[in-house]
């Protein structure tokens, strides 16, 4: 999402974002006589200023006759003027950083020409804005924290979730993770390391809070009901609490449902009456749109699980380590983002808990085949996808060649660790219960679900999910769906290639070798005759 360089000063940081990151859905834009300007908005947190700003602008002429001038300005200030020749350019130049202010800013790229002519095509993915940022004073309220989370630069990105073991741990973490993502507009890095976090969120009932956390509550000691309190400091701190575990869950729902705009250091249940709604509501009768759902439906809208804010959905975690849990929360947070609002009324539980049988079921975590609903009802595509994921780890085989067709261009270059970042998604109707949907986001036993979940939740791989099952890795997504047409010879060969990557490679090599020997033999016969 952004490159970050923390230099010697704790309050100074350097960040770089592509123009495509700042303007969602814009890979390129045209500058011409008829489209003379493009405005790109970006946001800075409160009390944050830029001491230095650079823009790398990548563009190509629309024709050999392109001319004119390209002007770049911030917030209507004095523009930087470029007079390019009619050939591809990649210019890097300083902007007037004094024009950049806390809050909303506008980068304007315009085109000026004396006569009508073809213009320029700007590559938004290769064009980057680089800012050196300094914070005058720490974040001081819930309102400022919410605006900081939504910022494009210098936003808190490493979120430490600190919880205790309890019967509602899954619910508390799920609600808070969704609330953070809805405020940020993307999925941050969830973790448990307070020392290196940009924001610490303590989630517990009153009796489990230490004195420092109780001191930031409205009463200065104990809450009088569900409460969300903010503590200023070098690392901002949130406390989500209540007098008992049920009130703490209610506070978690407040966090995921209501905006903090205009609020100071505390937010209680009474404030929810006048507070703005967080996120955007789904269309009415959204459940009716998911009658023929597949992974593409889920990736676009969260349906069928997001309908009615998750009121008929059970989310079951199969995570066994904290690292895997943070990967699962990342996936759940991305689901809330595409849904537009948090799944406030879903049931959340662990693998050993009994999920409501009359709810749709979404299983998140490694090796979900251990859940009875998956082992009994999963379609053939899910089994093929799991076998492919298990056998493709560390291999450079046909699966990766197939995945290249759906590759995420914004994904970073693969590393040795990426060989364990392989996951499987599946969504299907329950054959035992009409109208019920079962889905999973999982990984093979030896894969890292933390890495796999984060790579899916924080990249464009998410939008490539489709079919009844799919395998994903940092290299791309491979969908499988036999419901459209029954698997014929071609699909069986594809599945065999996915399941037996090395075997298929040896087979192809053997066929090629036989053809070579046959050609040599025929050539000798021709010469002999």
Image (cartoon, grey):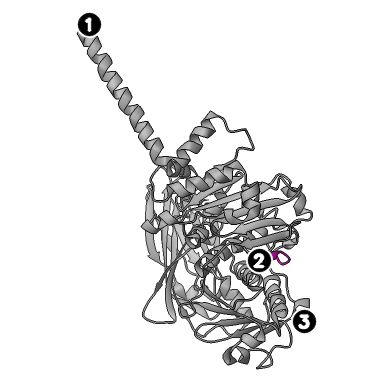
- Most extreme residue toward the top is 529
Q: Quadrant of the C terminus?
A: top left
Residue shown at 72% from the left, 49% from the top? 290
Left or right of 9? Residue 73 is right
The 10 Å Cα crowd at callout 3, few under 14, some 14 to 19, many 20 or more, is: few
Pinpoint residue 263: horizontal percent, then vertical percent.
68, 82
N-term mark: 3 or 2: 3
Residue extent of the magenta highlight: 343-349
Quick one: 86 or 273, which is closer to the camera?
Answer: 273
Residue shown at 37% from the left, 50% from the top? 85
Q: Which residue is labeled 1 in the image?
A: 529
> Which image quadrant is residue 515 in?
top left
Quick one: 369 or 246, which is closer to the camera?
Answer: 369
Q: Is residue 11 above or below residue 309?
A: below
Tell me the SS state at disc 1.
loop
Residue shown at 36% from the left, 80% from the top? 8
The 10 Å Cα crowd at callout 1, few under 14, some 14 to 19, many 20 or more, is: few
N-term mark: 1 or 3: 3
> Which image quadrant is residue 126 in?
bottom left
Residue shown at 61% from the left, 54% from the top? 440
Pinpoint residue 231: horizontal percent, then vertical percent.
58, 86
Q: Which residue is labeled 2 in the image?
A: 349
Tell me the SS state at disc 2.
strand
Q: Which residue is labeled 3 in the image?
A: 270
The span from disc 1 to disc 2 (Cα, nearest Å) is: 79 Å
């Amino acid at each position: 999402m952004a490159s970050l360089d923390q230099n010697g000063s704790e309050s100074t940081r350097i960040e770089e974002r592509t123009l495509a990151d700042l303007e969602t859905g814009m890979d390129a834009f045209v500058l011409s006589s008829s489209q003379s300007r493009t405005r790109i908005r970006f946001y800075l947190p409160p009390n944050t200023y830029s001491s230095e700003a650079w823009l790398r602008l990548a563009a190509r002429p629309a024709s050999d006759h392109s001319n004119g001038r390209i002007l770049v300005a911030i917030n209507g200030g004095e523009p930087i003027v470029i007079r390019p020749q009619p050939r591809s350019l990649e210019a890097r130049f300083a902007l007037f950083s004094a024009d950049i202010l806390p809050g909303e800013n506008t980068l304007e790229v315009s085109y000026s020409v004396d006569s009508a002519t073809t213009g320029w095509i700007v590559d938004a993915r290769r064009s980057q804005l680089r800012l050196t940022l300094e914070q005058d004073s720490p974040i001081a309220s819930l309102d400022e924290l919410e605006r900081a989370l939504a910022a494009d630069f210098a936003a808190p990105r490493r979120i430490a979730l600190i919880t205790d073991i309890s019967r509602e741990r899954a619910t508390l973490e799920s609600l808070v993770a969704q609330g953070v993502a809805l405020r940020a507009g993307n999925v941050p890095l969830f973790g448990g390391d307070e020392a290196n976090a940009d924001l610490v969120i303590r989630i517990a009932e009153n009796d489990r809070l230490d004195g420092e956390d109780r001191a930031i509550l409205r009463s200065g000691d104990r809450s009088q009901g569900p409460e969300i309190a903010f503590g200023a400091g070098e690392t901002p701190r949130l406390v989500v609490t209540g007098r008992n575990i049920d009130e703490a869950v209610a506070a978690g729902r407040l966090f995921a449902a209501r905006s903090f705009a205009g609020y100071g250091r505390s937010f209680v249940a009474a404030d929810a009456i006048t507070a703005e709604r967080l996120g955007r509501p789904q269309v009415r009768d959204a459940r009716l749109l998911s009658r023929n759902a597949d992974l593409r439906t889920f990736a676009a809208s969260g349906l069928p699980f997001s309908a009615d804010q998750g009121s008929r959905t059970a989310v079951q975690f199969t995570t066994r380590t904290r690292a895997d849990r943070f990967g699962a929360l990342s996936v759940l947070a991305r689901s809330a983002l595409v849904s537009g609002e948090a799944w406030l009324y879903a049931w959340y539980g662990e693998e050993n808990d009994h999920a409501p049988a009359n709810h749709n079921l979404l299983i998140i975590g490694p090796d979900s085949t251990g859940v009875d609903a998956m082992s009994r009802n999963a379609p053939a595509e899910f089994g093929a996808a799991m076998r492919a994921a298990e056998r493709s780890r560390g291999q450079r085989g046909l699966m990766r060649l197939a995945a290249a067709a759906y590759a995420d261009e914004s994904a970073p270059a693969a590393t040795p660790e990426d060989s364990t970042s392989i996951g499987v998604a599946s969504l299907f109707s329950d054959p035992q219960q009409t109208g019920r949907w079962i889905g999973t986001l999982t990984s093979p036993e030896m894969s890292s679900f933390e890495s796999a979940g984060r790579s899916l939740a924080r990249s464009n791989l998410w939008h490539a999910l489709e079919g009844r099952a799919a395998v994903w890795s940092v290299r791309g997504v491979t969908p499988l769906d036999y419901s459209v047409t029954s698997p014929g010879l071609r699909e069986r060969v594809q599945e065999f290639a996915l399941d037996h990557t090395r075997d298929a490679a040896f087979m192809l090599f053997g066929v090629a070798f036989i053809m070579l020997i046959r050609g040599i033999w025929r050539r000798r016969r021709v010469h002999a005759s």
